Image (tube, rainbow, N blue to C red):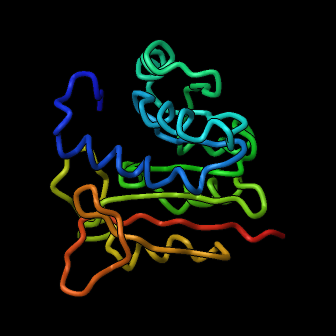
Amino acid sequence: MIPKLMKPTNGMLLEHLARYYFSTPYVKGRVLDIACGAGYGTHMVAKACKKKVEKIIGVDLDPKTIEYARKTYYHPLTEYRVADAQDTSLPQKLGRFETILSFETIEHLQDDRLFMRHLHEMLTPGGTLVLSTPFGKGRGKPCKCPFHIHQLTPEEFVELFEGFSEVEIFYQRGVTIEPPRKNVKYPLGVAVCKKEKG
């Protein structure tokens, strides 16, 4: 997604921006934005949280996308790197973080549990993870989006965070991110989780 090529009223763009804005109260220290894409969210958070952030590292699999991010969304607090979210040595390559952001990532990955172990390992004790994903028919089941391997059910989504000491689950509908309300169907889940302080 490249905001400069989209209308400012594009619903998908607004949903993505809403997730980054939502994350800002939780962001501090050394920050990882994994699967950062074009870098607009990494840049946005760097600007919004500049007094609380040491550095924000935006990571994506595609070298051309990372090059675009470096040229288009530079900020003194940002750094962009090419890395694979499913690389078994990812924690060793990237190090530890006080905050990790992962928006619309796990639905693209074959092994979302391995990815979650990586995120947990990369968080410092007491660190915060903010993660979102769209809901669907469940792990291992086909979905309508050709770019997604599968989409978790709301129940599977909650189970991802069993290794964390504190978990808050929110739901997104358009630009609204809120605790669940009765009789409302939500297409996306957003979790805010803390790692045990140790």
Residue found at x 40% / y 71%:
170
| Front position in the image: 14 or 96 | 14
Tell me what residue is drawn at x 64 percent, y 72 percent. 164
Q: Is residue 55 above or below residue 24?
A: above
Q: Which image quarter: residue 2?
A: top left
Furthest residue in direction bottom, as rendered = 182
Give the quarter of the figure containing the C terminus.
bottom right
Residue 36 percent location from the top left of the image: 46, 36
Q: Is residue 139 visible?
A: no
Q: Quadrant of residue 114?
A: bottom right
Residue 142, percent from left and from top: 22, 61
98 or 22: which is nearer to us?
22
Q: Residue at x 70, y 59 (%)?
A: 127
Q: For the view shown, which residue lies furthest in the right direction?
A: 198
Q: Quadrant of the N terminus?
A: top left
Residue 136 vertical placement versus 101 (above, below): below
Residue 112 can be seen, yes or no? yes
**131 relative position to 140: left or right:** right
Question: In this picture, is 147 found above or below 140?
Answer: above
Q: List x then y, in percent, for residue 180.
A: 33, 79
For this view, does 119 lie left or right of residue 134?
A: right
State whether residue 153 is above or below residue 109: below
Q: Residue 9's spot in the image, x, y percent?
A: 16, 39
Q: Which residue is painted at 49% across and 77% down in the image? A: 159
